[in-house]
Amino acid sequence: AQRVTQPEKLLSVFKGAPVELKCNYSYSGSPELFWYVQYSRQRLQLLLRHISRESIKGFTADLNKGETSFHLKKPFAQEEDSAMYYCALKYGNKLVFGAGTILRVKS
Amino acid sequence: DVKVTQSSRYLVKRTGEKVFLECVQDMDHENMFWYRQDPGLGLRLIYFSYDVKMKEKGDIPEGYSVSREKKERFSLILESASTNQTSMYLCASTTPGLAGYEQYFGPGTRLTVT
């Protein structure tokens, strides 16, 4: 069955430190993966998708099929990165979301 | 710019009441979704609809029903509200033609059942 696992509920880092939010998936087909972000008092929105191989707000994510992972990375965290981050897997015409990781960037 | 609106930001209802949550999108999207968002559990799909009058159960449909009479509107109904349905409810929409199948979310309705 398709499943998305985000092992960390909370990740706390200092400003300027590297960030890695972990995401592992379970899916028998060819995966399409996304990262969504929810800033305080804002609606959930798409951050990036693996098929675009893009960098958004300094974040990147690489799909590793061997390790079934799609970790989100940023080399230097900023305070405005503090938010809830969800990893999501597309199957059919639905998305399945992980439990989410709260990122707190301390000054 | 896609706009997804939800009828209420906050709602307080009593146990046993029938509750209606409404969602409207203005981008002619075919697919619409209702999720529950709970700490530690993430977003869980309740129901989704891929066309007018078409619906499909998600992962946690028990205690809920939906209605989609018009393309732009998707309603979530709690037939008899219970305290374990206290949660944040998010509506989303998308269309199969969107690159990457991006879902657009509403602001959420925080429902408290007492």
Image (cartoon, rainbow, N blue to C red):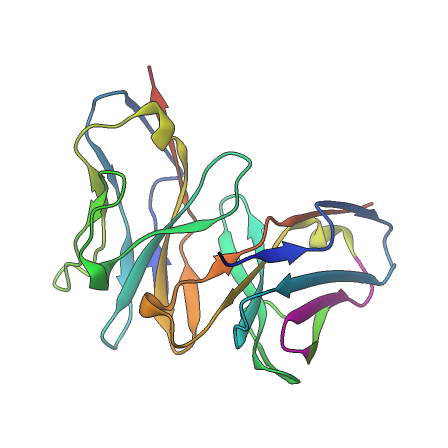
Q: Is residue B30 above or below residue A54?
A: below
Q: Is residue A80 left or right of residue B56?
A: left
| Residue at x 49%, y 45% (from the top left corner) | B40
Q: Return the residue found at the far front.
A: B1
Q: Quadrant of residue A90?
A: bottom left
Q: Residue furthest top?
A: A107
Q: Which quadrant: the C terminus of chain B?
A: top right
Q: Position of residue A72 (x, y in %)?
A: 24, 45
On the rendered structure, is A74 left or right of B69? left
Q: Is residue A2 visible?
A: no
Q: Residue at x 52, y 40 (%)?
A: A42
> Image quadrant of residue B21?
bottom right
Choose between A29 and B102: the one closer to the eye: B102
User: What are the residue bounds of the magenta stretch?
Assistant: B70-81
| Residue at 27% from the left image edge and 20% from the top image edge | A15
Assess whether residue B31 is covered by the magenta stretch.
Answer: no
| Residue A91 falls left or right of residue B38 | left
Observer able to see residue B9:
yes
